[in-house]
Amino acid sequence: MLQENGQAEDYLSEYMQEVYSGVFFKEFVLFFGENIQYYIMEESESGEQLTESGSLQRSDIMNDNPDSKYEIINDMMISMTLQDDDTLDHLIEESVALVGKPVPLMNKEDKVTAIQFLNDAGAFLITKSGDKVANYFGISKYTLYSYIDVNK
């Protein structure tokens, strides 16, 4: 496996569950843009033997299961990769709806609530989202980051 910095990492070895005689499986989650390289080894009396290897990549943008608990993370990964502001705009709208009043009527506590929702939803993983959110709420980036850190 490769880490984000491109350095090689040790391989993880896991046993596959047998679900039927001779049929094995292993479940894992891949997000948009992620790649996993696999090797299937069989144990026998003479040792281990490589029977299959390959690589799997998640590159589809279609939502097969929009109610999945992983879908918001996958949406963030797509947005980061595509630098798509639609997801950020949607999350900002959700944060305003959560507070229940338009930004000009929000006090500090309301803005803190909205911004912490955005932080929890992963909105700040999107490129340049801090600038956009600060401008939207009429605050400086310094204030934005202080609102994120309020409950830490």
Image (cartoon, grey):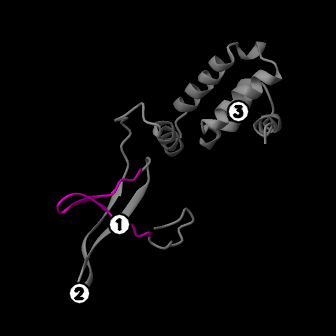
- Give the left or right position of residue 11, taking residue 127 as reference: left
61 vs 119, left or right, is: left
Q: Is mark 2 on a helix, strand or loop?
A: loop
- What residue type is disc 2 on? Ser
Q: Are marks 2 and 1 in contact (CB under 8 Å)?
A: no
Residue 40 location, x and y as percent?
A: 29, 69
Q: What residue type is labelled 3?
A: Gln
Report how far apart the C-alphas of labels 1 and 3 lie in the structure.
40 Å
Question: How busy is the neighbourhood of tag 1: few (under 14 within 10 Å), some, or many (20 plus)?
Answer: few
Can you identify the residue that label 2 sits on? 46
Residue at the spot 81% in from the left edge and 36% down from the top edge = 150
SS at circle 3: helix
Q: Is residue 127 visible?
A: no
Residue at left 50%, top 46%? 81
Give the Cα distance between marks 2 and 1: 18 Å
Q: What residue do we see at 73% from left, 17% from top?
A: 103
Disc 3 marks which residue?
116
Q: In this view, does 105 lie to the left or right of 132?
A: right
In the image, is residue 97 part of the stretch drawn in magenta? no
**Helix, strand or loop at mark 1:** loop
Q: Is residue 70 above or below residue 26?
A: above
Q: In which quarter of the image is residue 98?
A: top right
Q: Which residue is drawn at 78% across and 39% down?
A: 145
Task: State yes or no: residue 24 in magenta.
Answer: yes
- Which region is colored magenta? 12-29
Q: Residues within 10 Å of mark 2 (few under 14, many from 20)?
A: few
